[in-house]
Amino acid sequence: MKMAPRRFLLAVSLAVFAAGCDKPPPTAVAAVSPPAKHEHHPPHGGTPVVLGNEAYHLELVCDPDGGRLQAFVLDGEMENFIRTSEPSIEITATVGGVSKNLVLSAVANPATGETVGDTSLFEGKAEWLKSTPVFDGVLKTITIRGTAFADVRFNYPMGNDTDGK
């Protein structure tokens, strides 16, 4: 007689379990949010210029008082400096409808061990940089780790990232 209540409870438990298996699982309603915007933050607060499909970036930093433009070669996320063997890079800028060439030479940095021929920093000077806060430019060519990038168009200070990153 003591077994009957246990069998009854077991039968009821199995029936409840089996009945629950026939029901579809509850549907969870997940909040749909837009994907996080992929952004890059230039480490010097300069203008990002994308090379390739975000394989690398140049960060352009202008010092108008000194008429100087620097270009830092960075990885795709703009987090690490990438050294290149280029002795110089050339930019053609359109200033007031006139084309102007600007050569940025490789810069050595004893603090980081960078040398001309193994550096991530290029620098050039031009008098027109002192009075030109906005210009359209074309990076003629740069080779980074065996990949050449040519005729890269950009605007200074907007860059060339069409997604507004």
Image (cartoon, rainbow, N blue to C red):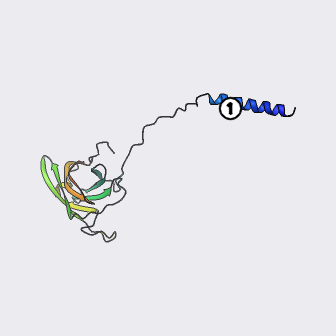
Residue drawn where x is 29% and y is 59% of the image? 72
Identify which residue, 156 or 22, lies in the foreground. Answer: 22
Q: Is residue 115 above or below residue 2?
A: below
Q: Give left or right: position of 10 versus 108.
A: right
Please state the horizontal and vertical placement of residue 69, each as a whole percent of the image.
Answer: 23, 58
Residue drawn where x is 29% and y is 51% of the image? 47
Identify which residue, 69 or 77, lies in the foreground. Answer: 77
Identify which residue, 47 or 88, lies in the foreground. Answer: 88
Q: Give left or right: position of 1 versus 94.
A: right
Quadrant occupied by the C terminus: top left
Q: How many marks?
A: 1
**Can you tell which quarter of the image residue 38 is in?**
top left
Q: Is residue 160 above or below residue 33?
A: below
Q: Of helix, strand and loop, which one carries label 1?
A: helix
Q: Is residue 113 above or below residue 121?
A: below
Please state the horizontal and vertical placement of residue 137, each as a whole percent of the image.
Answer: 19, 50
Please state the horizontal and vertical placement of residue 113, each as a whole percent of the image.
Answer: 32, 70
Q: Is residue 52 above or below residue 25?
A: below
Q: Give left or right: position of 29 versus 17.
A: left
- The local crowd at label 1, few if under 14, some if 14 to 19, many if 20 or more residues have their Cα within 10 Å, is few
Instruction: Read off the residue under disc 1.
Output: 17
Quadrant occupied by the N terminus: top right
Residue drawn where x is 17% and y is 51% of the image? 93
**Can you tell which quarter of the image residue 148 is in?**
bottom left
Label 1 amino acid? Phe
